[in-house]
Amino acid sequence: MGFKNISKTSVRGETEYFDDSKFIWPVPSTKRVSSYFGRRRGRNHDGIDIPAKRGTHIVASSNGIVSFVGRMKGYGKTIVIKHDGGHHTVYAHNRKNYVKKGQKISQGEVIAQVGNTGRS
């Protein structure tokens, strides 16, 4: 899941970042990653962290079906979306989740708000 060729556009008054591959950036940001996969504080970190202001809308990176909505240990309020090709995206530490399990989601659809639930 790469975000190689990212461009900036304004949609509904919010800045969103898109790339020319299958996935888009899930939050308006400076395209900065604050933490990568790998060891962190003696534990394995199984994702990337993208910094954004609390309350910011999170959008689905690609079309898919919501396979999980709820709380996960360490992740707090979480959404998992299953995409074609066997890919899954996980949106964790959310303030509010707006979707339900089994819901069909379109790329760019607002699914949650940035928060700091779980170990964030």
Image: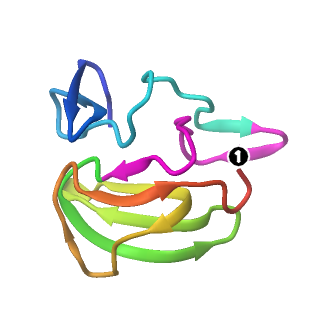
Q: Residue at x 15, y 27 (%)?
A: 20
Q: Is residue 108 magenta?
A: no
Q: Residue at x 38, y 34 (%)?
A: 28
Q: In the rendering, at what x and y percent does residue 29 appear?
A: 43, 29
Q: Classify 72 as above or below 118.
A: below
Can you tell which quarter of the image residue 112 is in? bottom left
Q: Residue at x 23, y 59 (%)?
A: 83
Label 1: few (<14), some (14–19) or many (≥20) C-alpha neighbours in 10 Å: few
Q: Classify 115 as above or below 7.
A: below
Q: Classify 25 as above or below 90.
A: above
Q: For mark 1, give the secondary structure.
A: strand
Left-right relation of 84 to 61: left
Q: Classify 35 as above or below 107.
A: above
Q: In the rendering, at what x and y percent does residue 80 appear?
A: 40, 65
Q: Point out the stretch of residues depicted in magenta.
A: 40-59
Q: Which residue is mark 1?
A: 44
Q: Amino acid at mark 1?
A: Asn
Q: Residue at x 23, y 30 (%)?
A: 18
Can you tell which quarter of the image residue 76 is in? bottom right
Q: Is residue 48 magenta?
A: yes
Can you tell which quarter of the image residue 111 is in? bottom left
Looking at the rendered structure, the number of numbered marks drawn on it comes to: 1
The residue sitting at the right extreme is: 42
Quadrant the N terminus occupies: top left
Left-right relation of 54 to 109: right
